[in-house]
Image: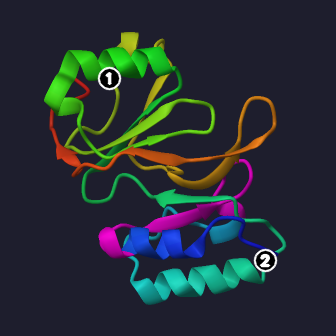
Amino acid sequence: MTIIFDLEELFRFKCVHPDWVLLLGDKSKNPSRLVGVWKDITSQSMQDLEALVERVLSSEVEAWNFGPRTGLGGLACLDWDWEFLAYRWNKHFGERAKTLTFRTPNMGYRMLYTTAEKENSSPFKRHLHMEFENGGYVAVGGFAEDCEGNKQPYTKITDAPIKVDNSIIVD
């Protein structure tokens, strides 16, 4: 089929984060239709990524986005659906909130951290439309549909080192 995002962006991302496992997602941000059983993938070389791209190019499924598999090496994502809550999070945590961050097509935010925390155990945070991804696929590049069905890009908005914070969820 086809890949609708810039492959050079994918390969640059892999060069910057060589230890990450990068996955490709379909229109609904599902990597399974393109990658197969991806939770078994625990390491990935540049050659492995190139082979994945070749496999996707011969697939009947369109690749819309890409991003890391969280849960490996402590990589986790705070996925904010509501912009105003991400703003308040940033204001409250200040320097601790300055980490690699992407804006989603629906105006949410994905903030990447390295942490020893494994889950969002605080019940009040579930009602804030904030997901803690630690073992899933997190699209950060390419495109997704917005709530009106229009193709919109993921955009890097904070190009900062990924923070190591082992109490960011608890706090």
Amino acid type at circle 2 is Ser
Q: Secondary structure at mark 1?
A: loop
Q: Is residue 105 left or right of residue 60?
A: left
The nearer-to-camera label among 2 and 1 is: 2
The count of marks equals 2
Q: Is residue 162 left or right of residue 39?
A: left
Please name the residue that numbered disc 2 is placed on. Answer: 59
Residue 18: x %, y % from top left: 32, 74
**Residue at 79% in and 77% down:** 59
Residue 138: x %, y % from top left: 50, 49
**Residue at 61% in and 69% down:** 6
Q: Is residue 145 left or right of residue 37?
A: right
- Of residues 133 and 113, the one nearer the viewer is 113
Q: How is the image coloured?
A: rainbow
Res. 121 mark: 1
Q: Is residue 166 left or right of residue 88?
A: left
Residue 23: x %, y % from top left: 53, 65
* Quadrant of the frame with the C terminus: top left
Res. 37 mark: none
Q: Secondary structure at mark 2?
A: loop
Q: Which residues are magenta?
A: 15-33
Amino acid type at circle 1 is Ser
**Marks 2,1: beta carbons within 8 A:** no
Crowding at dot 2, Cα within 10 Å, few <14 / some 14-19 / many 20+, comes out as some
Residue 139 among those drawn in magenta: no
**Residue at 68% in and 47% down:** 144
Position above or below: 82 against 35: above
Position above or below: 140 against 126: below
